[in-house]
Amino acid sequence: MLVYAAGVCYVLGFLIINQITLRLMLMLGTCFYILYYWFVAETPLWDAIYISAMIGCANLSGLLALEARKSRLAIPRAHRDIYDHFPSLPPGDFRTLMHHAKRYTIEKPTQLTIEGAPMTRLFYTLSGETTITKKHDLFKMPPGVFVGEVAFLTHQRASATTVMSAGSEVIEWSAADLRRASEKSSRFKMALEAALSLDMAQKVAYSVAPNEVTWRPDLAQTASESSSFSKP
């Protein structure tokens, strides 16, 4: 019965998409296996118990890492005031993102990107007005947008010329640093690309009908909750 119970837990675990529930089911199955190895023979099967315990500890470590990634305690204290700008990023991924960031205020109008020029940096505007020129079209964007995300995602040159007004506060990243971080963690890569893709979609809508579109950062939260970030 213990073996059957363990097998059921493992099968159900692998059928469940949510990774936390999956790990909990595997943990329960491991406990049943340990009980089986304890009682199946006249003396406990210590080798099997040790190996099962090691598997359980590894599973528990991964479970704790998942929970820590979602905990707001992971948000860097210096940047807690801007976490609401990135609602689609779990706290752990936000911490990784800000680890590579440089945050500063622009003293005079500054050109962040030049259409057709190579892009080695990614920006996010916290305050100030963003003027975007693409071919012969010119439009302005409110704060709270990424700059250079198209070039970052496509590995191509800048798609537009962008100028920030004096007094604007921006965050800057090295594109190379973010790509290296993405190579180390597929979970971070998925979260970052989802945030950038949502930002692009909102900017397209805003540029087409600026008077009819309300900037909706809460949409990012909805996208996060329905995304596969918590899936295996």
Image (spheres, rainbow, N blue to C red):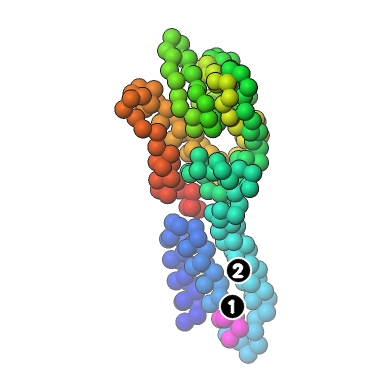
Is 26 or 171 nearer to us in this picture?
Answer: 171
Q: Position of residue 170 (x, y in %)?
A: 58, 30
Q: Is residue 228 found left or right of 103 in the rendered image? A: left
Q: Which residue lies under the disc numbered 1?
A: 34
Residue 43 appears in the picture as rendered: yes
Disc 1 residue crowd, few under 14, some 14–19, many 20+, Cα 10 Å: many
Please rate how many residues cluster around mark 2, counting C-alpha atoms within 10 Å: few if below 14, some from 14 to 19, many from 20.
Answer: many
Q: What residue is shown with label 2?
A: 56
Q: Residue at x 62, y 28 (%)?
A: 105
- Quadrant for residue 96, please give it: top right
Question: How far is mark 2 from mark 1, CA to CA?
Answer: 10 Å
Q: Which residues are magenta?
A: 34-39
- Tell me the amino acid under the disc marked 2: Gly
For residue 50, side relative to residue 24 (left or right): right
Q: Are marks 2 and 1 in contact (CB under 8 Å)?
A: yes
Residue plotted at (48% across, 52% down):
230
Q: Nearer the viewer, residue 49 or 66?
A: 66
Q: Quadrant of residue 43?
A: bottom right
Residue 133, percent across and down? 48, 14
Please report the residue visible at 58 percent of the width from the left and 29 percent of the height from the top: 169
Residue at (52% x, 26% y) in the render: 128
Secondary structure beneath disc 1?
A: helix
Front residue of this view, candidates 78 and 3: 78
Which comes sooner in the sequence, label 2 or label 1? 1
